[in-house]
Image (cartoon, coloured by chain):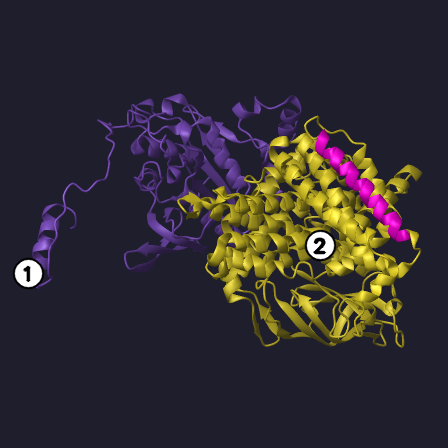
Amino acid sequence: MSLNIVVLAKQVPDTRNVGKDAMKADGTINRAALPAIFNPEDLNALEQALQLKDAHPGSKITLVTMGLPRSAEMVRESLYRGGDDGVVLTDRPLGGADTLATSYSLAQTIRHLDKVDIIVGGRQAIDGDTAQVGPQIAEKLGLPQVTYAESVKVEDGIATIKRRIENGFETVTCPLPLVVTVNGSADACRPRNAKLIQKYKYAVTPSEKAQLSEDRQKLVESRPYLNIREWGVADIEADPNQIGMKGSPTKVKTVVNVVFQAKESKTIEGGDEAQLEGLVKELIADHIIG
Amino acid sequence: MANFYKDNKALQYHLRHPLMEKIVGMKERDYTQSQEFDYAPVDFDDAIDSYDKILEITGEITAETIAPNAESVDKEGPHHANGRVAYASKTQENLDVTRKAGLYGVSMPRKYGGLNLPNVTFSMMSEMIAQADAGFQNIWSLQSCIDTLFEAGDEDQFERYIPRVCNGETMSMDLTEPDAGSDLQSVMLKASQDEDGTWRLNGVKRFITNGDSDIHLVLARSEEGSKDGRGLSMFIYDKRNGGVIVRRIEDKMGIHGSPTCELVFKNAKAELCGSRRLGLIKYVMSLMNGARLGITAQSVGLCQAAYNEAIDYARSREQFGVAIINFPAVAEMLSNIKAKLDAARTILYETARFVDVYKIWEQISRERQLTPEERTEMKRYNRLADAFTPLSKASSSEYANQTAYDCIQIHGGSGFMRDYTCERLYRDARIMNIYEGTTQLQVVAAIRHVTTGTYLAQMKEYAEGQYSDEVAPLKARVDKMMAAYEEAVEKVKSYENPDYITFHARRMVEMAAWTIMSYLLCYDASREPELFMQSANVYVRYAEARLAANMKFINDFTPDETAIYNQE
């Protein structure tokens, strides 16, 4: 049985290689100083989608991403690895969205796609680290969700998912359709493929196409698979009050630069039970553990 | 994220050599394939952009997967059980990732599922893979055996075998036997025919790199009673048919990831590839030339790895309160490593370009008749490819050893410990000037191009090229090296004694190589001074002094003195 698979992915600043220019004086991220990358756990999710496609020939992988127009690169990265198409959701009113508005916008996008069997995304993005968007999409679409997935298999309309839990794994089953968020401990994503990168390197959104030379524009026009969908608020028929800043109840009051330093230290000599108990109690009281 | 291509401006420079426009245009048959294949380029810029992207993929895989796996592969090595080879676990991972990236069938036409890339691009991928893990480069680059099958076989064989190689099935060339190493004319493995005409192979092959591969090209004696090379033919053995077992795998000094096998053929079903009797004299020569270029790329990759290890260590290691890179003795060693790396690389890609022009004309000649001009050009490049292949293989593999040696020296006592990568590089390098023909045998292949003037003619062409004002003084010194080379060759030839030519062969071939690499570096420095000026300066001085030493030896020597070296 072939599957319609949606991969949710986000373009994020590469916070793993943070230099000294990474933060601006006001405490916000200096996006210009950080390269934009494919959110790492979304790559794990893409790999799960590709493995499902390998196991179910004829399956179709659609990558959905919301962000700046340059997020089209995310769709191309998917195409280079075996994805089939994608949607870039980009529109000014969508900007400044928190997880609630983001999940609403993405859920609306998915509603406007063909019937979906399985939606996979990374557990969380490295810029916000909320892990909320996947679960919220499931809620909005009324679908079951499985989080912390390490592998996803589908047989006879039932998904079997191995989940990473504390101290081990658990295996759960769930009928399709469903939302799965994939953990970073799942299989690493396969590399880009030499043939596919040649086939899809000119895949562009309409706004990118306008930047190409006339020759290349003609090439894109003659090959339908090189046209990436670029959707805005109107395309997904979104309620203006539920998107962007307006739809985001989360308000950032202030951002503080945290500098880790030990202010004081305490040495506890010996190690009998009473001393250890005292230490543990103190740590709990200070909210360091517990 | 580290990337062996994006981090290497020299590779990007060589990809953009002026001759590439011609090579790519020929390889793409004037860009006529884009209607039929969705991954074919529509013009030159498109093609180079695609090569860039494929090299970037290779650069990422080599830096992020293959290089980090190399230490574990070196320690684990392949396993031998029940007549089969199981690769080291990380070698298997390297295979999986390169297969998923589609880095197989690189040179093959698209109609069989290949990438249709020129040898220049293939060699760049090969170089980066060797930089990451020289042993894995053996397994990966043996895919180039398919080039020989594509030259010698028939359409039916192309259709059956080429797509499999494009999908990542591995290959091996089964030539060496216990009593036939450098002397392949002595091959004994017997090929005989059943009544229905089926060929069967019986005998033993030894030192076969990746000997448990999926598809083998086997050199065997098809003509009963024959004794020399003319009784040998080339066969395809398909592992799916069975009949060959791996009797043992060798316990080697280096390139541990690459299984070196002893194979026993027991009535193994095989098929003839090409014409009978041409196995050695035609096909194996082609196979060996491809393999030699592969080892050149491997050697350059090793030089790059040695340079990276050496400079990283020299920058971080402090003694007497300063980083050791600041000590003149260390800085000179590093400069020489870098200069040899750049020299080996520039002759590698010069050779690859010659091979490309020649081979692509040969392929086109199978599709249509060539014009007389085209035939002349094909012959010219064939000759240059033949002349430059042994020269680049000998130079680069010797430099791989020298740079690995110096890399350890820069590490001092730490370099002698197994904790550092330089120790593995040193062991891995040691085979490079031995297999696919020792340096001594490369000299045998190259010497006729000394005596017939192929090298000199090419040097003269380089001498007439355009150089920047900045490079001109250096280039003038290389012109003098050329004159000295010409004089030395004339002097040796003047005795009209073939044994005397053989005696000085290595000295003369080295002089040719040093002069040619000096010219090429002057050219590179003219185009990209920032990248190559320092190496050109260092290399020309190094080569000049070495050349003078060889010159003195030849000038002070007379034929009767060769007796000094007689050994019983």
Residue type for callout 2: Ser
Q: Which SS type dominates the magenta stretch? A: helix
| Residue for badge 1 | A274
Q: Per the image, is B476 magenta?
A: yes
The quarter of the rendered structure image containing the C terminus of chain B is: bottom right
Residue B313 visible in image: yes
How many residues crowd mark 2 within 10 Å: few (<14), some (14–19), many (20+)?
A: many
Q: Which residues are magenta?
A: B472-493
The chain letter for the residue carrying disc 2 is B
- Where does residue A52 sit, x and y in percent of width and height? 48, 51
Q: Secondary structure at mark 2?
A: helix
Residue B36 visible in image: no
- Residue under the point 24% across and 28% down: A252
- Where does residue A247 sit, x and y in percent of width and height? 29, 26
- Residue under the point 89% across and 74% down: B226
Give the quarter of the image for residue B11.
Answer: top right
Q: Nearer the viewer, residue A3 or A227?
A: A227
In the picture as drawn, the residue positioned furthest to the front comes out as: B556
- Where does residue A51 sit, x and y in percent of width and height? 49, 52
In the picture as drawn, the residue positioned furthest to the left comes out as: A274
| Residue for badge 2 | B144
Q: Nearer the viewer, residue B454 or A239?
A: B454
Name the side, left or right, on which B513 lies relative to B432: right
Q: Secondary structure at mark 1?
A: helix
Give the quarter of the image for residue B225.
Answer: bottom right
Chain B tint as drawn: yellow
Q: Which chain is purple?
A: A
Q: Nearer the viewer, residue B249 or B471?
A: B471
Name the side, left or right, on which A88 lies relative to B560: left
